[in-house]
Image (spheres, rainbow, N blue to C red):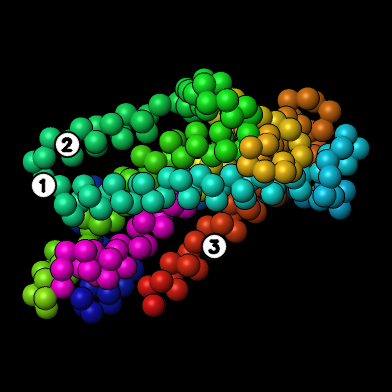
Amino acid sequence: MKAINNVTFKDKLQGYIKHPFSGLLFLLVSLAALITFAVLFFLISYILMRGIPHLTLSLFEWNYNTTNVSMTPAIVNTITMVLLALLLAGPFGIFSAIYLVEYAGSGNKLVKTVRTTTETLSGIPSIVFGLFGYLFFVVALGWSFSLLAGAFTLAIMILPLVMRTTEEALMSVPMSYREGSFALGAGKLRTIFRIVLPAAIPGILAGIILATGRVVGETAALMFTAGSVAQIPGSVMGSGRTLAVHMYSLASEGLYVNQASATAVVLLIVVIALNAFSGFVAKKLRKG
């Protein structure tokens, strides 16, 4: 390993000259990585340059009106929506993955059915989830346009993502961890919660981060279920718009395009902050 790490650039260059196909493949891979970074850098730079000049204190006033176009109610509603959706989808997704990996056999027909179902749900457009949420939660259950209806709809949307990422994280834990725990006399449940889950936490949190990003950026489903009232509701049964819906509403009206750009900056910051917080929690849990 040490010899491999000490290979100089000259040695690599000579190797690429002897094997031109390897050099071409290296250039293509490097170009793909550079393009990916450039696209991400361009998007973030463009959003920041368009939005930062229009950030004003009036955009962060507590109450929304047509004068200040405040995004504070949308920020509060976004955080509430993320927490509700994760509280609903997180336990179901994680426990379902535990059953599929730790308890169900590899040839179990139920496992194949559940995996096929989750993959199908992952491919359904968000507008279809929004229509289902409107017909079932808003109309059939009589919840009207509310944060709770939106949270349940989003929970159904992100459930397959949480399940699949948790399942992959659990399967990546070496079988020797389980065998060692069983050899020391630990039971199945204790092994799962004290050995397997702590080792799989980074992968599980990665799925939760992806699910959080989808919740924060969702618009179509929430417009059909949570509504677009630009106020902080008194309870989860009240209607309210998230940051993504708020930005869409401002841009579609055509009167507050600059404020919509400023909202995009705040939305980007919220997503980065949530990802950083999840990473911090993951490090703490791994140390613990």
Front-most of residues 179 and 99: 99
| Viewer can see residue 188 | yes
**Residue range (magenta):** 186-211
Residue 163 inside the magenta-drawn segment: no
Left or right: residue 30 compared with residue 250: left
**Coordinates of residue 21 in the picture (x, y in percent):** 23, 47
**Coordinates of residue 30 in the picture (x, y in percent):** 39, 52
Residue 193 inside the magenta-drawn segment: yes
Left or right: residue 194 compared with residue 205: left
Please give the residue where the numbered disc 3 appears in the rendered image: 276
**Could you tell me how many numbered marks the image carries?**
3
Q: Nearer the viewer, mark 3 or mark 2?
A: 2
Labels 2 and 1: the sequence-earlier one? 1
Residue at position x 29%, y 47% in the image:
96
Labels 1 and 3: the sequence-earlier one? 1
Using the image, tell me which numbered label, if any, was put on residue 105.
Answer: 1
Residue at position x 84%, y 45% in the image:
63
| Viewer can see residue 47 | no
